[in-house]
Amino acid sequence: MNTIRLLVNGFLIGIANIIPGMSGGTLALVLGIYERLITALRNIGLQTVKRVFRVLTFRKSAVDDLKTELRRIDFGFLMILGVGAVAAVLVSTKLIVHLLESQHDATYGFFCGLVLTSIIIPMRMLRGFSWRELVVLLVSAALIVFIEELKKDAAVTASASGNDVPLSIGTFITFFACGVIGISAMILPGVSGSFLLLAFGVYFPLLTVIKNFMEGIPTSLAGEVIQPFLSDLLILGIFALGCLFGLLVFTRLLEFLLDRYRNLTISFLMGLMFGSLYGLWPFRDYLMVGDERYDTAHLLPQVDMNLVITVCVFLVGCAVIFGFSRLEKETG
């Protein structure tokens, strides 16, 4: 029964992590497992990695040491939660990609409502606000707008090549870095890992890669391994390495920054949130290459049913975060 409960908890945390603006850390807090989860994650370190690799020597002492290490980091607990979270991501990804393709403006409107309203969560974490915090906020917001403008040029290039996520050193570095950042957000209740992926322009491409990878598994099991499947596997592997590195190193750096420069760090995160709203603007001009859509210029909305639907789902997104925020506040 405890295993089933942990699987359900992991599934719920996975759902929260895949929705921008919702924090898996906050949901773990609400479910009463946050402290155990963070303690287990913090216990993972270089010692864990060394003992995993020592098993390759096939010595009995190495196996015993690994068993001891797995108990120390509460591996069973983490594994069950992880299985639930991964299942949630796999189940949700196809639905979100479908909504992006069939209901583009409304889906972006919903995400926009989630992110805009979720700014109240880090605002509550601030201990005062001065010109220094304002400068950091504006710089980080400008950084995201700059990245969004670069993405427009990248969209034209990608549309010309017909490749959603072109393989390049830049792509690998981006996915690795965003894996580091995304997993690091888990240590903070109120900060959404998927939002940070969204802010840096990786969220939607990552969903597409996961969806394509899942669709390619039956073909690969049948013995026909195709190039796009291998490319998706490579990108997911690099992202996973980034998550591992973030777990080992960056979470500790983020804790240090929050301890020494709390307000400036939170202001930087808030700036990312404000800046991402520019990239989430639902109404866009776009290019179509085959079945693929590539967003380009921002447009003013026309007064029609599409605008009404987009505003309605925007308000639903706001309501979701208000409810989520209230749960966090009541939990303490």
Image (spheres, grey):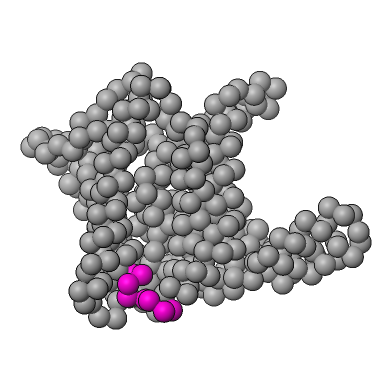
Name the side, left or right, on which 235 lies relative to 24.
right
The residue that appears at 58% across and 37% down in the rendered structure is 234
Snapshot quadrant of residue 185: bottom left
Depth check: give the residue in front, 172 or 10. 172
Depth check: give the residue in front, 115 or 312. 115
Depth check: give the residue in front, 143 or 103. 143
Name the side, left or right, on which 175 lies relative to 247.
left
Name the side, left or right, on which 313 lies relative to 20.
left
Coordinates of residue 55 in the picture (x, y in percent) = 83, 57
Report if residue 223 lies within the magenta region. no
Coordinates of residue 284 in the picture (x, y in percent) = 21, 35
Specify the farthest residue to the right. 60
Q: Main secondary structure of the magenta part?
A: helix
Depth check: give the residue in front, 170 or 328. 170
Tally the numbered discs. 0
Name the side, left or right, on which 60 lies relative to 135.
right
Q: Which residues are magenta?
A: 259-266
The residue that appears at 81% across and 58% down in the rendered structure is 54
Coordinates of residue 90 in the picture (x, y in percent) = 52, 43
The residue that appears at 65% across and 58% down in the rendered structure is 79
Decide if residue 122 is in sight here: no
Specify the farthest residue to the front. 169
Quadrant assignment for the C terminus: bottom left
The residue that appears at 49% across and 34% down in the rendered structure is 168
Specify the farthest residue to the left. 303
